[in-house]
Structures are given as structure tokens and as C-alpha cells.
Image (tube, helix red, strand yellow):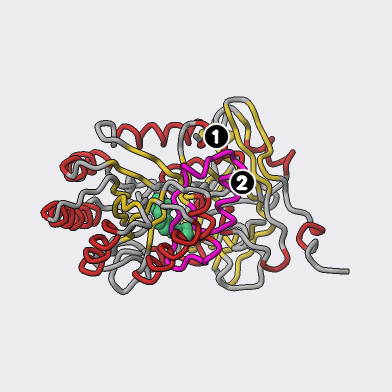
């Protein structure tokens, strides 16, 4: 979606320099075309399977984007009342919402039951009791699945691994088996299936293979007890090519090795992509504020801080960086840092990059997922503007926050 034309960087057919001049920086920009291409890729992988896609709203909660996804028949994976509200305002029906979370509040559980959510993914035996109690009280019969913890190593950053037994998510298979037998007989819930989500930014096929194989064994065991499942929610987790080395999850291998197991289960698949659907469709435009050489160490200071994009500071995440203007100049190794008062406030460390000058624009790539949605007001910085590009059309999809917005909750 990003390409140089006459040595200037464009998003689709729109000049990024012109966008930056007009809308100021830091500025999140998204390409609808790229989102559509990602959705097509997902559909291709699951083409022979009954599939329901629910977008993980935590990755990007922009209502205008959610609306476009909803219009394509995509539902929402939500974990809080706030995410439910974002999806609802985007016109996504409760009947297309799946609620996840290891410790849902009673308010969230009651809301999901009252509004006939597509699915409640129950995360513990105690939560199952709470769901049954509310169902009884409300005279409703909610659709439920159990989130299982398959104890497989997703080989990703420890902060975004979720399917190891030491992680807080899900129910182990033995307890899950007993709960399923109970739920199957329960007059208060519709037992529908199981869920696994083993982690995020997963680059290898084998962790998926291992988790799905465990689920397949469980399904066979349940079948012997005449218990069948309608759905298997396989979570999200597909890793993308942040490093531009071709490191993203190999979808051909996934299709070859993993899809046959899913097919053999004879269930409908629910997929909860976040990053894969939108990560590479977003970029963050910033401006060089200053440069500095300190005892030979080079710094490029930009107006993008850890409040705008926390992934590099929090996970040491790599995001590719491109200058907006392509000119012949020496390559240097520099730390690209924000202006916040923390040494960890970084966009990239020890990065090989063309030498850049004050007031030049640059683009931090692949920030469509867990970019704006993890932004904060640290150092009292207002959050950036978000723009959506659809062909030649440029729409502001979230205004830049103002200083007044930031303090609007303080009483007089
Ligand atoms: N389903 C569930 C239950 C999840 O917890 C998540 C993400 C997803 C689906 C979507 O996963 P994805 O397809 O995006 O990998 N902030 C971190 C990522 C945290 C992911 C949390 N759960 C990051 O910036 O890398």
C-alpha cells in the first residue's frame, strides 16, 4: 500500500507529504484496499470450510473501520463494554458478537446474555456458574463455548503468549471435558463448542497444528459420549511480516498442514483475526524534530512517542521505517526516539536508516493493529488523528484529540 512515486512516498494514490502538511503529525493513516486484500487472503485459506470471521476489536477500535468490516458481514470479538459499544456504534449486531475475557465483569456477562450474543466464551468453571445463574435469572439460554488452554508454546513474545498453562487464559483440557459434559446437559445454556487462542504474532504453523490436534482429540472423546460441537473458535494470532524479510506466517503451509485437521473435525470455524486483518493496512506518519550525535551515538528525535505507539517500548517490537522523501544520502545507524521523558520512549533502536534532517517526514509501517488502540495521554500528549484512504478519497475517521478533550473530565 506504500510506494514511492517520483521519489515521494504515497499511500495508494495519495501523497503522504501532502497528508502530513494538511493534517499535521503524528498521523495514523489506513488503506481500505489493503484491509480488503487481507480479508480476501483469510477467506482463501478457509475457502472450503464454513467460516465466521469476528474481528478482534482490541486491535483497532475505530468505529468507521469497524463499520466497513460489519458491512462485509464481519462480526466482532469484544472483551469490554467499551469494545461492545464500539462495535454496536459501527452497526455490528449483538448476534455477531463473541465475548472473550478471563475475568468478565457481571455487567459484561449479563449484557451478553440479555442481548443474545452470538457466543460467550467461558474462561473458567466459576465463570460458567455465573453464566448459568444469570441465564436462570434472566430466563435466557445463551450460546456458550469454553476457552481451552492447550498448553502449547506459540514461540512469540512472552507478553503476547496466551496458550501456555502458566498463562492466565483458558481451562485445561481435563477440566474442560468435565465442564462440557455438564454444559451439554444444562437446561440454562446452549453448549456450542470450544475456543483456543494461543497467542499473537505467531510466525510458525506448528503451534497451531499442535493446539488444533489436541482439540481434535477432545472432539473425538466427546463424540464417544455422544456430545457434538457446532463451532470451534480458533482465535486469532497470525503473525505478519514486520521485518520485511518474509517472516510472516506462511499461509500456504498453514493451508496444507492445518486446514485438513479443521476439516476433519466437521464443525463450523470461527476466526478472530486482529493483527493480520489490519496490521499492515495502517502506518504512522511522524516528523523529525531534531537530530543529535552524542559521543558518536546518533539519535533522530521524532514527534511520535510511546504514547502514540507503545509496541517498540513494550515488546521491543520492530516496525519498519521509511523516509517520505527518497533522496540519495548516506545510511547511518541511529536510535529513533520520541520526545517523552523516558529512556524507553523509542520507535527503533540501532536502526540502519538513511540520514534524516529536521522537519522531514517519516513513516512507521504496520501500525494498523495495536497502534492507536494502545495509545495513551502520557506526558499529557493528545492522541493523534486517524485517516482512512479509499482509492483517492481521504476521510478523517477520528479527529486529533485537543488539550481541552484531554482535561474534559476534570470537574470545575
Ligand atoms: N482472540 C483473542 C481471544 C485475543 O485475545 C486476541 C488478541 C485475538 C483474538 C487477536 O489476536 P491477533 O490476530 O491480533 O494476534 N498488544 C499486543 C497483542 C495482544 C493480543 C491480545 N489478544 C501487540 O501489540 O502485539
Q: Measured along the vertical axis of the image, is residue 100 above or below residue 248?
A: below
**From the viewer's perspective, is 326 left or right of 279?**
right
Q: Position of residue 165 (x, y in %)?
A: 28, 71
Measured Cα–Cα span from mark 2 to mark 1: 17 Å
Residue drawn at x 28%, y 64% is: 149
Q: Of the two numbered discs 2 and 1 on the same chain, state the one appearing first in sequence.
A: 2
Q: Residue placed farthest to the right in the image?
A: 412
Does any portion of residue 331 appear in the rendered image?
no
Q: How many marks?
A: 2
Mark 2: give few (<14), some (14-19) or many (20+) Cα within 10 Å: many
Q: Which residue is mark 2?
A: 28
**Residue 103 lies in the magenta stretch:** yes
Residue drawn at x 21%, y 44% is: 262
Q: Residue placed farthest to the top in the image?
A: 392
**From the viewer's perspective, is 404 left or right of 91?**
right
Q: Which residue is mark 1?
A: 68
Amino acid at each position: 500500500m506504500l510506494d514511492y512515486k517520483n521519489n515521494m512516498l504515497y499511500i495508494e494514490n495519495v501523497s503522504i507529504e501532502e497528508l502530513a502538511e494538511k493534517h499535521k503529525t503524528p498521523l495514523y493513516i489506513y488503506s481500505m484496499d489493503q484491509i480488503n486484500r487481507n480479508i480476501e487472503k483469510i477467506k482463501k485459506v478457509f475457502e472450503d470450510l464454513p467460516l465466521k470471521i469476528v474481528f478482534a476489536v482490541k486491535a483497532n477500535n475505530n468505529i468507521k473501520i469497524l463499520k466497513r468490516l460489519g458491512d462485509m458481514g464481519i462480526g466482532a470479538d469484544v472483551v469490554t463494554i467499551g469494545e461492545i459499544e464500539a462495535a454496536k456504534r459501527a452497526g455490528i449486531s449483538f448476534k455477531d458478537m463473541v465475548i472473550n475475557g478471563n475475568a468478565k465483569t457481571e455487567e459484561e456477562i449479563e449484557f451478553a446474555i440479555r442481548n443474545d450474543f452470538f457466543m460467550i466464551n467461558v474462561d473458567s468453571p466459576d465463570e460458567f456458574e455465573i453464566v448459568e445463574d444469570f441465564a436462570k435469572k434472566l430466563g435466557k439460554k445463551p450460546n456458550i463455548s469454553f476457552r481451552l488452554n492447550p498448553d502449547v508454546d506459540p514461540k512469540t513474545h512472552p507478553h503476547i503468549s496466551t496458550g501456555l498453562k502458566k498463562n492466565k487464559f483458558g481451562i485445561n483440557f481435563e477440566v474442560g471435558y468435565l465442564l462440557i459434559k455438564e454444559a451439554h446437559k444444562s437446561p440454562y445454556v446452549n453448549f456450542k463448542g470450544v475456543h483456543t487462542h494461543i497467542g499473537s504474532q505467531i510466525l510458525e504453523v506448528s503451534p497451531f497444528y499442535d493446539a488444533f490436534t489436541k482439540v481434535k482429540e477432545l472432539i473425538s472423546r466427546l463424540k464417544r459420549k455422544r456430545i457434538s460441537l457446532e463451532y470451534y473458535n480458533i482465535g486469532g494470532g497470525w503473525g505478519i511480516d514486520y521485518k520485511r524479510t518474509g517472516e510472516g506466517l506462511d499461509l500456504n503451509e498453514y493451508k496444507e498442514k492445518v486446514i485438513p485437521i479443521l476439516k476433519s473435525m466437521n464443525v463450523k470455524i470461527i476466526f478472530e483475526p486482529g493483527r493480520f486483518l489490519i496490521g499492515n493496512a495502517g502506518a504512522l506518519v511522524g516528523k523529525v524534530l531534531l537530530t543529535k550525535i552524542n559521543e558518536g551515538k546518533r539519535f533522530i528525535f521524532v514527534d511520535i512517542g510511546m504514547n502514540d505507539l507503545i509496541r517498540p517500548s513494550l515488546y521491543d517490537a520492530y516496525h519498519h521505517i521509511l523516509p517520505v522523501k527518497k533522496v540519495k544520502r548516506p545510511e547511518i545507524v541511529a536510535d529513533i526516539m520520541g520526545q517523552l521523558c523516558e529512556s524507553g520512549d523509542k520507535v527503533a533502536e540501532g536502526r540502519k536508516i538513511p540520514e534524516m534532517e529536521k522537519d522531514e517526514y517519516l513513516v512507521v509501517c504496520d501500525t494498523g493493529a495495536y497502534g492507536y488502540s494502545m495509545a495513551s495521554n502520557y506526558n499529557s500528549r493528545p492522541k493523534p488523528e486517524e485517516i482512512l484512504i479509499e482509492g483517492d478519497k481521504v476521510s478523517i475517521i477520528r479527529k486529533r484529540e485537543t488539550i481541552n478533550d484531554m482535561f474534559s473530565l476534570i470537574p470545575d
